[in-house]
Each structure stands twice: as C-alpha cells, then as structure tokens.
Amino acid sequence: MILEVAILNIKVGLSADFEKAFNEAQEIISSMKGYVSHQLKKCLEEEDKYILLVNWETLEDHTIGFRGSDAYQDWKKLLHHFYEPFPVVEHYVNIDWK
C-alpha cells in the first residue's frame, strides 16, 4: 500500500469554501480504482492549512490511474484554485521491520 501525503495551504479566508468543495471532491477520489481510504485533517496551529492522506493500492493507481483520468479534471476544477502555493505531493511506503 502507498500513502499519498499533501500539505494543503489554502488561500486566506477560503477554508470554509474549500471544505465544502472537498466534501464533493472526496466522492470522486473514493470511486477510483486502487483507492483504499483517505483523511483530511485541519491544522490547529495554522489557519487555512490542511493535510490530505490518501491510501492507494499502488503508486500507479494514483499517478497514472487517478491523475490520468477524466475524474481528475473534475477534482482539479473543484479544488486546485484554493491552493497557495500549489502543494507538493509525496508518496510513502511502510517499513518492513525484521
């Protein structure tokens, strides 16, 4: 399993609008092949800051399947105009402890 991590800095004063749009957008991502689960968390220390955590079965399910889909265009229309700056998205895997 792959964990996608994105820190989302939202333009000042638009957090409520972002949360409404994300509520709609989460239906898009959760319908994608390889999607496992997600969490959106709001920062306590910084207003207008969130972290998005998405579990995918494979890296390609996110980078090729989701980002290459028509549904991703709808995701972008709903959410991308809220970000400042645009988020860096990173992917993580579990450590296999011996």
Image (tube, rainbow, N blue to C red):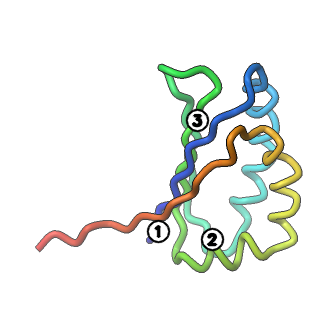
Q: CA distance from mark 2 to mark 1?
A: 9 Å
Amino acid type, label 2: His
Precedes in sequence: disc 3 or disc 1: 1
Dividing the picture into quadrants, the one containing residue 20 is top right
For the image shown, how many numbered marks are present on the structure?
A: 3
> Which residue lies most toward the front here?
85
Residue sitting at x 61%, y 74%: 34
Q: Is residue 11 left or right of residue 88?
A: right
In the rendered structure, are the residues bearing label 2 and label 1 in contact, judged by CB atoms less than 8 Å apart? Answer: yes
Pick the residue in front: 87 or 54: 87
Residue sitting at x 57%, y 52%: 38
Q: Pick the quarter of the image with the N terminus.
A: bottom left
Pick the residue in front: 84 or 31: 84
Crowding around mark 1 (Cα neighbors within 10 Å: few <14, some 14 to 19, many 20+) is some
Q: Which residue is mark 3?
A: 50
Crowding around mark 3 (Cα neighbors within 10 Å: few <14, some 14 to 19, many 20+) is some
Q: Which residue is mark 2?
A: 62
Amino acid type, label 3: Tyr
Q: Position of residue 39 (x, y in %)?
A: 55, 45
Q: Nearer the viewer, mark 3 or mark 1?
A: 3
Q: Is residue 67 left or right of residue 59?
A: right
Badge number at residue 2: 1
Dividing the picture into quadrants, the one containing residue 50 is top right
Q: Is residue 92 above or below residue 9?
A: below
Q: Position of residue 45 (x, y in %)?
A: 48, 20
Q: CA distance from mark 3 to mark 1?
A: 20 Å
Q: Position of residue 15 (x, y in %)?
A: 73, 26
In the rendered structure, are the residues bearing label 3 and label 2 in contact, judged by CB atoms less than 8 Å apart? Answer: no
Crowding around mark 2 (Cα neighbors within 10 Å: few <14, some 14 to 19, many 20+) is many
Q: Is residue 34 left or right of residue 82?
A: left
